[in-house]
Image (cartoon, rainbow, N blue to C red):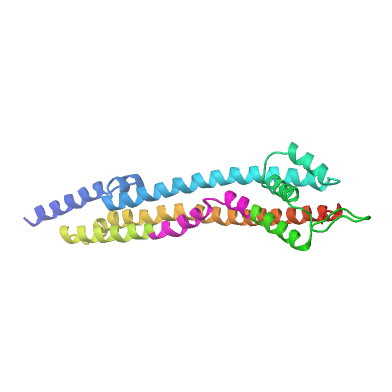
Amino acid sequence: MMAAGIVAALLQIAGTRQALPSSMLGMLMNSDPVTKGVLALLVVLSLVSWAIMFSKWRGFKRAEASGRAFVADFERARGMDDAMLMAQRAKPSAFTVVFARACSFLNDTKPALGATSDRTARLSGSQVEALRLVLDAEGAKAREDLGAYIPWLATVSSVSPLIGLFGTVLGVIEAFIGIGQKGAGNIQAVAPGIGTALMATAAALAVAIPAAFAYNVFASRLNRFDDALEGFGSELIALMVREGRI
């Protein structure tokens, strides 16, 4: 009788070992519905973040290339008329939009300082300040358009670990409930449930790390782009000063 009991116990242990999943895919298939739901949500967040990353990478590449080309031409301009011709030939960009807004402001604003024998009519100090505000507003709008959806990357990078931790905690609770119901406390009974629960944390880190890295990169590029627009506005005003418009 004792020998038969030992054999039955060995067979039960062997059956348990065979039933243990040997890969992450097997652990996923044997996971509870809560863990599967958490992993599915993380997959959706990952797809959203990667779509934003690819979209922003293309947007920044296009905006920076067209902006550099126009600024290089603008720096060689001999006057506003020459710069207007260059803007008409250049590819549309935030810099051409800012330049067009400045030209529109000049056309719509009557100079406060009248012409004399040695100079043309010029804008007053308050009009120059208004022009600067208009250029800043146009630059802020371009920055907002280019930076759209970038905050989502920060949201994904901060929320994903919490979602993964939530799935891990629920998975561990589910594993211990199963252990209590089956009355088994050995490592073979604990390992599958704990391993499946930890998959949620691993998946959350895989989602959060690229999103956090991309957010920092795009935020830095957005700040540099904003600085370039502000510098272009200053150069534009300086050109108007040289021409005697201000």
The quadrant of the image that shows the N terminus is: bottom left
Residue 206 in the image: state x and y as whole percent: 45, 52
Quadrant hosting residue 63: top right
* Quadrant of the rendering where the C terminus is positioned: bottom right
For the question of whether residue 212 can be seen, the reply is yes
Residue at image coords 13%, 55%: 6
Observer able to see residue 183? no
Q: Indicate the position of residue 122 as horizontal and vertical percent values.
A: 82, 56
Relative horizontal placement of residue 63, taking residue 174 as reference (left or right): right
View extreme (right): residue = 117
Q: Of helix, strand and loop, which mostly describes the magenta segment? A: helix
Q: Residue furthest left?
A: 1
Q: Nearer the viewer, residue 210 or 221?
A: 221
Q: Is residue 129 above or below residue 69?
A: below
Q: Position of residue 187 (x, y in %)?
A: 27, 59
Image point (40%, 47%), residue name: 43
x, y percent for residue 60: 62, 46
Q: Is residue 92 left or right of residue 13?
A: right
Queried whether the magenta region covers residue 145, the answer comes back as: yes
Quarter of the image where one finds residue 200: bottom left
Q: Residue at x 27, y 47 (%)?
A: 30
Most foreground residue, 212 or 93:
93
Q: Decide if residue 53 is on the left or right side of residue 82.
A: left
Q: Depth check: 56 or 100 in front?
A: 100
Q: Which residues are magenta?
A: 140-162
Task: Examine the structure image and report whether residue 238 is included in the region drawn in magenta.
Answer: no
